[in-house]
Image: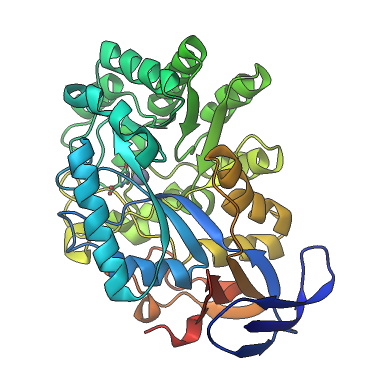
Amino acid sequence: MIHINNIQTLANQRKNLSLPSAAEITLNAEQLTLLPALIDPHVHFRTPGLEHKEDWRTAAKASICGGYTTVFDMPNTLPPTVTAELLREKKQLIDKQLAEAGIPLRYHLFFGADKNHLDEIPKVKAAVIGIKVFMGCSTGNLVIDDDSSLHAVFAIAASQDMLVAVHAEDESMLQQQKIKYSGHTDYSIHSTIRSPEVAARAVEKAIALARLYKTRLYILHVSTLDEINLIKAAKAEGLAVYAETTPHHLFINDSAYEQWRGKVVMNPPIRPAPHQAALFAAIRDNIIDTLGTDHAPHTLEEKILPYGKCPSGIPGIETALPLLLNAYHEGLLTLEHIVALTSTRAREIFRLPVNEDIVLVDLNKQAIVNENTLKTKCGWSPFVGRRLTGWPVYTILGDQLFNLSEIK
Ligand code: DOR
Ligand code: ZN
């Protein structure tokens, strides 16, 4: 058994917990607070084909160190996950890597919508957490850029009671913007090209399709006030529309390009500061449901390439919880908001069964984000150097207790 004594609960009470385990462990948890383990509905762990950036051995350690025991992985791998057969092969590789890591991380996979493989969608209904639609090109070449395929995906999903998750950036607007700003070499042009209007146009379109076909719609990485307003109206209308934001859109704004250059290039891009305040307000107003880290590592060699060659994406699964807990201390979020964002809402939206996984956090621990202790294979973070208050200390996955200071 694992005995956890005198732990602080969210209801501000002290309690003793006993959890089933082969090991006999007793923790004096007086300094610690009990939270449900985190669920990350949006990661790119890079298997298959891109394992020089990350694999499930390194990513599983990074997840546990971040307090996460469940992740949903995206299909923009090499090859992309667009057939039932490719899905099966991907699962086998993941299971092998997790067994090698000795970490039975809970995971689900998104299926990639591809216009040449729409007939594969019903085949994978029971095996996937949802269908991922890239409405605009991002990392990899998965994209649905024509209306008839987009309509077909939403219709099939609704008929199969599958959820559609959208990367909402409008491809035709993106193409125009890229021509308009071609020749610009500063990394900050990324936020001009991928403007708030590009995101809003796609969100508007996705909501219209969800309304038309009665499809359950999950809008990934919401980053702007414009999107929030559209989602607020859709929710008020009673549509099954859910919204995710990310740690980088909450905690980084477009003033970061000067210092961090290619390291803060991601899609959708970082925004001017007022959008950050709007995101926090939307969490407090229950417009934003979840936080997905969009953990999307690329190597340092890739990220120092000039604008245009530097791939979009940043790691984030190890730093999300400390950033949120630090925001709690700053009065931006309550612990209840953090639990809703990182666990409860994802469990409801994606209909996950309940489990007993927990994370024990030291709300008063202060530490500086240090790249030498990161477990992600890419080995860097745009949050390096930030002093944060509130860190996970133990993560319990099933009957396994991980002391996070001992994970090598
Ligand atoms: O910045 C991003 N990186 N956005 C995406 O949509 C994909 C991701 C990746 O896979 O690198
Ligand atoms: Zn992503």
Task: Provide residue 320's location: percent of width, then percent of height.
Answer: 51, 61
Q: Nearer the viewer, residue 383 or 68?
A: 68
Q: Nearer the viewer, residue 193 or 205?
A: 205
**Residue that appears at 36% across and 19% down:** 156
**Residue that appears at 35% across and 54% down:** 264
Task: Provide residue 55's location: percent of width, then percent of height.
Answer: 25, 64
Give the quadrant of residue 101. bottom left
Task: Provide residue 45's location: percent of width, then percent of height.
Answer: 30, 57
Residue 292 appears in the picture as rendered:
yes
Task: Provide residue 323's location: percent of width, then percent of height.
Answer: 56, 63
Residue 225 appears in the picture as rendered:
no
State left or right for residue 20 relative to residue 151.
right
Q: How is the image coloured?
A: rainbow
State left or right for residue 349 relative to residue 120.
right
**Residue that appears at 43% across and 47% down:** 254
Q: Quadrant of the N terminus?
A: bottom right
State left or right for residue 224 relative to residue 170.
right
Give the quadrant of residue 370. bottom left
Q: Nearer the viewer, residue 278 or 340?
A: 340
